[in-house]
Amino acid sequence: MEIDALSAEVVDACIAIHRELGPGLLESVYELVLAGELKVRGLKVDRQVPVDIEFRGQRHLAAFRIDLLIDDRLVLEIKSVEQLSRAHGKQLLTYLRLTGQPVGLLLNFSGATMKEGIRRVVNEYRQPQESSASPRLRVNQTIGD
C-alpha cells in the first residue's frame, strides 16, 4: 500500500474512533484503540517502538519511543491536548528525521472533531555522508505490541 493510501486508512480509523469515543480520554487509550483498529484492518502495527541513538560514540538505548509505527514506515504521534502547538510538529519531524522515515501523522483526539486534530508531517531531511557529529540510529522493534 502506498504511503498516501496508508495515511488515508489511518485517518479513516481515527475519525471512526473519535466519533464513537469522543474527546477527553488519555493518549494511551486512543493509542491502544487505534492500534487495535488498524490491526483489524490488516495493517502491521508496532506500539511504543524504542529508538536507540548513537551520538558521538555513545549509545543511548531507547532514547525515545514512537507511539505507533504502521507498516514499518508511517510514524504516528498521538496527542490528547487542548490544542496542538508548533512544538508537537517539531517533535514528530525530529522523530522522522532521526529514524529516516518519510511521513508521520500528528493526531490530536481532543478536538470537537477529529479533522481539526490531524497534521501530516513530511521528512525532507537528507542525512549528510558519514559525519562524526551526526547521530546514528537504530529502531529497536523487539519491544512493543
Image: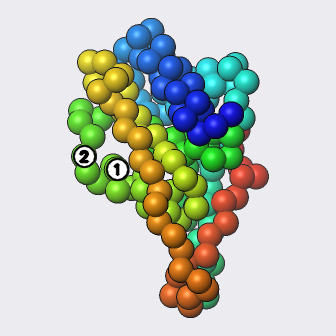
Residue at image location 52% in from the left, 27% down from the top = 8
Could you tell me how far apart the alpha carbons at marks 2 and 1 are, in whole angstroms? 7 Å
Q: Is residue 130 above or below residue 97?
A: below
Element type at mark 1: helix
Q: Is residue 25 above or below residue 54?
A: above
* Count of all numbered marks drawn on residues in the image: 2
For mark 2, does the 10 Å Cα neighbourhood hold few (<14), some (14 to 19), or many (20 or more) residues? few
Q: Are marks 2 and 1 in contact (CB under 8 Å)?
A: yes
Position above or below: 59 against 77? below
- Label 1, residues with CA under 10 Å away: few <14, some 14-19, many ≥20: some
The C terminus lies in quadrant? top right
Where 70 sits versus 112, above or below? below
Among the 4 quarters of the image, the one containing residue 90:
bottom left
Q: Residue at x 51, y 48 (%)?
A: 103
| Residue to which mark 2 is pinned | 85
Amino acid type, label 1: Gly
Horizontally, residue 1 falls left or right of residue 101, namely: right
Q: Amino acid at mark 2?
A: Ser
On the image, the x and y values in percent for residue 128 come to: 53, 80
Front-most of residues 26 and 96 = 96
The residue wearing badge 1 is 89
* Residue 34 position within the rendered picture, expressed as x and y whole percent measured from the top left: 55, 26
Is residue 24 among the parts visible in the rendering? Answer: no
The residue drawn where x is 29% and y is 54% is 87
Q: Residue furthest bottom?
A: 132
Residue 139 placement (x, y as % from top left)? 66, 60
Q: Residue at x 34, y 50 (%)?
A: 89
The colour style of the image is rainbow
Label 2 residue SS: loop
Residue at the right extreme of this rendering: 142
Residue 76 seen anywhere in this rendered image of the structure: yes
